[in-house]
Amino acid sequence: MMKDVWISITNRQRAEQGVEDTMVFDTDGYYFFDDGIGVLSYQESELTGLEGTRTSVMVMPDQVVIDRDGTLTGRMVFREGTRDTFPYSTPYGELPLGIDTRRIRHCFNENGGDVEIDYIANLAHTFVTKNHFRISVKEMEKSNGQPD
């Protein structure tokens, strides 16, 4: 059963020169959990630079898949200890984006949960950033639309 949830996302990036940038994004969305797999979905905003894009995250025991559809289209597959390259379609064209997943930690159940991913992003095999990505999902209270 799909539930209304509050989603908190933190993405910390460190460039090669040591410059660190952190983005925090909170939004409402939808979530369901079935047979050990958590799936959440939310609309991106102007804050993330992806306005007009719907993001879906599927957290499975051995991998995390992030699908984006809309202004920006792409599928990122995170598997601990693996590298993946995929086309990332933007309004300005398609880019070959690579991810080297270092670590995934997650804990999900019927009420929500947390996932953390440490990975390195590269563009055309050139280092771009080290990333720490965290998503926290909490079921909303029915009465006031706030997280429990």
Image: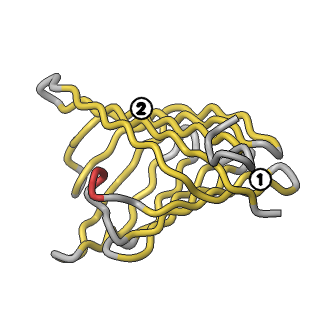
Identify which residue is drawn at 39% across, 48% down: 99
Per the image, label 1 sits on a secondary structure element best described as strand
User: In which quadrant of the rendered view does residue 80 lie?
Assistant: top right
According to the picture, the residue beneath numbered tag 2 turns out to be 132
Give how far across and how far down residue 18 sits, in percent.
16, 22
Measure the C-alpha gap from mark 1 to mark 2. 22 Å
Q: Is residue 28 left or right of residue 51?
A: right
Mark 1 or mark 2: whose residue is earlier in sequence: 1
Q: Is residue 133 above or below residue 125?
A: above
User: In which quadrant of the rendered view does residue 29 lie?
Assistant: bottom right
Per the image, label 2 sits on a secondary structure element best described as strand
- Most extreme residue toward the right, as rendered? 35
Identify which residue is drawn at 46% across, 33% down: 118
Q: Residues within 10 Å of mark 1 (few under 14, many from 20)?
A: some
Give how far across and how far down residue 12 sits, in percent.
34, 31
Q: Nearer the viewer, residue 94 or 112?
A: 112
Label ID, residue 37: 1
Q: Nearer the viewer, residue 97 or 22?
A: 22
Q: Residues within 10 Å of mark 2 (few under 14, many from 20)?
A: some
Give how far across and how far down residue 74 sits, in percent.
41, 69
Identify which residue is drawn at 47% across, 58% down: 76
Q: Nearer the viewer, residue 42 or 83?
A: 42
Give the residue type at disc 2.
His
Give how far across and how far down residue 70 sits, in percent.
38, 76
Give the residue type at disc 1.
Ile
